[in-house]
Image (spheres, grey):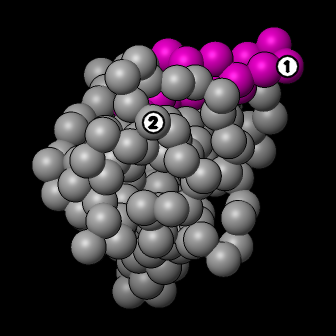
């Protein structure tokens, strides 16, 4: 293989890796993709959103084999947040709506949580995927609930140069 072809292949792979690593950053002042839920946890007082949370970052990565990983980082106010629960759902766009195809969760007894979890379901070629995250941030017995999702990833194999349209 010539050096020129090798450089083109490396550049193509780096471009794909860069495109797959985009994320959606959600901060208190932006208010993007933060649907307020009316769910109530019995025995706990619900507060206004962003009372205990200073920022949330959500990511979805899908490698060339369809292996997907959810990453969700939640930062609460250090003097207030005592526990963070993250529910992460891998969703596939199907028949005009988002359908959850896998999920995972974790609990952190801290003001900061970094949750990275691979999903057991592999992405199907030509489909759109995202993660939907349901996050509970506690301060003692009170909590707030924030939902957010990653950007949409259209999955296709990097070795297939065709224009896949689902």
Q: Is residue 94 above or below residue 12?
A: above
Q: How far from the left and from the top, in percent, is residue 46?
A: 51, 39
Q: Residues within 10 Å of mark 1 (few under 14, many from 20)?
A: few
Of 135 and 140, the residue lying toward us: 140
Query: Going 64% across and 33% down the picture, which residue do you hit?
Result: 37
Residue 96's disc is: 1
Residue receiving disc 2: 45
Describe the element under mark 1 as helix, strand or loop.
loop
In-image side of 42 versus 29 (left or right): left
Query: Going 64% across and 17% down the picture, which residue do you hit?
Result: 99
Q: Residues within 10 Å of mark 2 (few under 14, many from 20)?
A: some
Which numbered mark, 2 or 1, is in the foreground of this view?
2
Q: Is residue 112 above or below residue 1?
A: above
Marked residue nearer the N-terminal end (2 or 1): 2
Task: Identify the image quadrant of the N terminus.
Answer: bottom left
Q: Is residue 21 above or below residue 35?
A: below
């Amino acid at each position: 293989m010539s050096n020129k072809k090798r450089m083109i292949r490396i550049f193509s792979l780096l471009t794909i890796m860069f495109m797959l690593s985009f994320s959606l950053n959600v901060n208190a002042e932006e208010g993007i993709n933060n649907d307020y839920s009316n769910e109530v946890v019995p025995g706990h007082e619900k507060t206004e959103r962003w009372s205990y949370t200073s920022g949330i970052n959500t990511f979805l990565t899908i490698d060339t084999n369809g292996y997907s990983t959810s990453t969700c980082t939640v930062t609460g106010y250090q003097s207030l947040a005592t526990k963070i629960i993250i529910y992460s759902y891998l969703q596939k766009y199907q028949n005009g709506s988002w359908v959850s195809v896998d999920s995972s969760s974790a609990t952190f007894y801290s003001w900061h949580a970094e949750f990275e979890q691979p999903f057991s379901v592999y992405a199907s070629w030509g489909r759109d995927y995202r993660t939907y995250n349901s996050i509970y941030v506690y301060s003692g017995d009170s909590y707030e609930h924030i939902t957010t999702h990653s950007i949409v990833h259209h999955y296709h194999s990097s070795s297939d140069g065709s224009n896949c349209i689902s």
